[in-house]
Amino acid sequence: MVKGRRDLIHNPAMYRTIPLGIVLRRAPGVTRWARWSWKATAVLPGAPDASWRVLRESDGTTEYHAATVPLDLHGAETEAYVHGLGAEVPCVYVVMRPIAGAQDHPFQILLVTASPYEAQDYCDSAEEVVEKVAMPEGLEAWVREFVDLFHEEEAFVKRRRNKQTEGARQDGIGDPRIHTGADVYASPGLKRGRVL
């Protein structure tokens, strides 16, 4: 970042952040190959820092407050938030990275996002696990308030044809019926005169 230009590329008024506690549930696996099944089940808005604190144990199932990470909202990403809030159940997405060989705490919590577009980017990498968790009502209201403040609908602009090229004829580049030595788009066979 260029010193003195911070205010031109960063508008602090268009950013909001809140700490979210991530709750992971460990249940007995249903196959002999997986001893445990892990799933992100809830988020705790405003939670203090935690590191795999046990919240509840019952019938072999344990819920952990695995970590607290910030949920950042950016004014430039409001279109993604609108898309996410328009779902039947608005959700946040927990992005976790598996820790090789770890048994008790097998995931590192990387981030939580309200943007389904950002979550999709992490799904495409196949290096992280992305879990969808329903937003609590208070968190949903907080995200909606942010969107109401900063979202601007972009007007649809229909692309129009260039009237100069309507009805114009092709110049024959690449056409096998036109023989020219300067045809850079022709196949190698055509250049050697073997194509009929």
Image (spheres, rainbow, N blue to C red):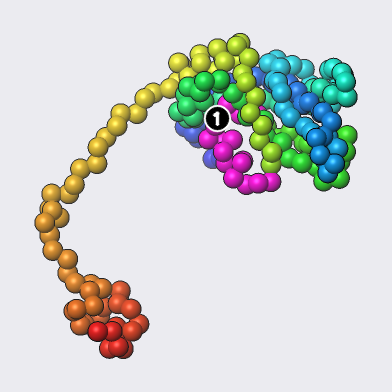
Image position of 192 (left or right of 44): left
The quadrant of the picture occupied by the N terminus is: top right
**Residue at x 68% of width, y 16% of height:** 45
Q: Quadrant of residue 98?
A: top right
Highlighted magenta segment, given as a residue range? 112-127
**Residue 39 versus residue 146 in the image, above or below:** below
| Image coordinates for residue 88, horizontal then vertical, percent | 52, 20
| Image coordinates for residue 77, horizontal then vertical, percent | 49, 30
**Residue at x 13% of width, y 63% of height:** 169
Image position of 16 (left or right of 19): left
Number of marks drawn: 1
Residue at image mark 1: 115
The quadrant of the picture occupied by the C terminus is: bottom left
Q: Can the viewer see residue 3 in this picture?
A: no
The residue most toward the front is 31
Q: Secondary structure at mark 1?
A: loop
Q: Amino acid at mark 1?
A: Ser
Q: Can the viewer see residue 56 in this picture?
A: yes
| Image coordinates for residue 151, horizontal then vertical, percent | 43, 22
**Residue at x 45% of width, y 20% of height:** 150
Q: Quadrant of residue 121?
A: top right
Image position of 183 (left or right of 63): left
**Residue at x 45% of width, y 16% of height:** 148
Image position of 29 (left or right of 180): right
**Residue 60 versus residue 6 in the image, above or below:** above
